[in-house]
């Protein structure tokens, strides 16, 4: 743990760097909240802008998939299980959510892990238990383990609706945007524990884009930002690991093996980025009996969005949360219009809580 004096020195070192207008991006929902909570943006030089990218799993889930989940919740005998944030995310119609569907009679339950959903399936064999798989490489191995355990136990009433996504294709999609002017990435520490340093080397090797893997304490984040800005000021481009106590060069080999055992990568839709090839985790054919999308013929319909939510622009760096016309007015944590204000890792929720001005 660094001292307050260390933080002051880091800020002085950042201030001394010869930088012009510089935009950098963090791509982790936990970083989003930690940065806002520590007031880090307000401490950086005026010419440095720190943006929030597509690092919130709930936020990148497209409206069509959310609407289809709401319909699935009304199927007779179905139990929808998932993390708490998902229950409050609004559908295309304002006020519609899994919480509302539960009030209308749907069986919707909060769980803290996919194994909790597996336990429900074992205890209630007469119900069809569906786990909503939301997340990136961080949570995907645990979800894979639950599906493999269900197969091993011979459970016929457990299935996964996989909305899991891979971070690398999203970063490539961002870099392909014509108006993307970010000069470096604060890489997500949690994802890096799984994919390792090697999972982000493509940024430097293929795009000449510097990246630093950062931890989550304010001092760790400041240190990672300094290293990133130092690379930018020197015209360097490489991947640095500023979180070595948790991230190894090769990542977590066992977790990656679990992913390979259960999933294949398939095309997936992302809010703000559209369809990205090979960016979603889909169960392998031999596990198709546990695929809720096939068991229940999950067919998302085109959503008609009329609520003015700009979440997609926020998570692609086009817009600050405060610049959305709904922010803090029609859209608040108590009455959220979009997922960026709902999720505990959402950029709008973080800005409302810590950076309202």
Image (cartoon, rainbow, N blue to C red):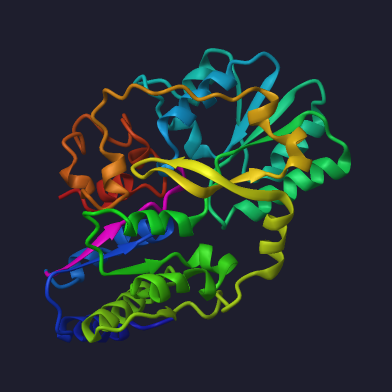
Image quadrant holding the N terminus, namely bottom left
Q: Residue 322 location, x and y as percent?
A: 18, 46
Q: Looking at the rendering, which quadrant does residue 303 occupy? A: top left
Residue at the (72%, 58%) spot, across then down: 258
Position of 323 relative to 224 (above/below):
above
Q: Is residue 245 visible?
A: yes
Q: Is residue 112 magenta?
A: no
Is residue 56 toward the left or the right of residue 83 in the image?
left
Q: Residue 260 location, x and y as percent?
A: 69, 57
Residue at the (70%, 17%) spot, across then down: 77
Position of 103 relative to 260 (above/below):
above
Q: Is residue 213 visible?
A: no
Position of 18 relative to 352 (above/below):
below
Nearer to the camera, 123 or 204: 204
Q: Residue 243 location, x and y as percent?
A: 48, 77
Residue at the (42%, 49%) spot, across then down: 56
Is residue 26 toward the left or the right of residue 234 in the image?
right
Please give the range of residues in magenta: 47-58
Q: Is residue 51 magenta?
A: yes
Is residue 315 toward the left or the right of residue 152 in the image?
left
Nearer to the camera, 321 or 92: 92
Q: Residue 6 location, x and y as percent?
A: 31, 85
Nearer to the camera, 312 or 13: 312
Nearer to the camera, 89 or 8: 89
Q: How many marks?
A: 0
Residue at the (32%, 45%) spot, across then down: 349
Is residue 129 toward the left or the right of residue 185 in the image?
right
């Amino acid at each position: 743990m660094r001292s307050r004096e260390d933080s002051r020195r880091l800020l002085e070192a950042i201030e001394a760097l010869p930088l012009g207008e510089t935009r950098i991006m963090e791509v982790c929902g936990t970083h989003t909240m930690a940065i806002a909570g520590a007031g880090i943006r307000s401490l950086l030089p005026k010419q440095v802008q720190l943006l929030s990218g597509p690092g919130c799993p709930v936020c990148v889930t497209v409206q069509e998939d959310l609407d289809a989940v709401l319909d699935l919740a009304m199927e007779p005998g179905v139990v929808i299980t998932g993390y708490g944030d998902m229950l409050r995310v609004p559908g295309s119609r304002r006020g519609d959510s899994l919480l509302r569907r539960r009030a209308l009679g749907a069986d919707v339950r909060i769980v803290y892990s996919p194994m909790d959903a597996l336990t429900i399936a074992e205890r209630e064999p007469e119900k069809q238990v569906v786990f909503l798989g939301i997340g990136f490489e961080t949570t995907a191995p645990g979800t894979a383990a639950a599906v493999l355990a269900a197969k091993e136990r011979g459970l016929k009433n457990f299935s996964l609706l996989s909305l899991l996504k891979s971070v690398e294709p999203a970063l490539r999609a961002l870099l392909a945007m014509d108006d993307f002017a970010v000069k470096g990435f604060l890489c997500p520490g949690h994802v890096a524990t799984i994919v390792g340093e090697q999972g982000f080397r493509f940024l430097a090797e293929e795009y000449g884009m510097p990246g630093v893997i950062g931890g989550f304490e304010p001092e760790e984040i400041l240190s990672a930002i300094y290293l990133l800005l130092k690379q930018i000021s020197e015209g360097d481009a490489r991947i640095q690991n500023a979180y070595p106590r948790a991230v190894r060069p090769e990542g977590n080999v066992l977790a990656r093996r679990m992913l390979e055992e259960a999933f294949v990568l398939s095309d997936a839709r992302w809010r703000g980025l559209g369809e990205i090839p090979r960016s979603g985790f889909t169960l392998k054919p031999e596990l198709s009996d546990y695929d809720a999308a096939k068991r229940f013929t999950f067919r998302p319909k085109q959503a008609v969005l009329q609520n003015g939510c700009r979440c997609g622009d926020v998570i692609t760096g086009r817009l600050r949360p405060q610049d959305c016309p709904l922010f803090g007015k029609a859209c608040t944590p108590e009455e959220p219009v979009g997922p960026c204000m709902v999720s505990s890792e959402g950029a709008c929720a973080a800005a409302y809580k810590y950076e309202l001005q």
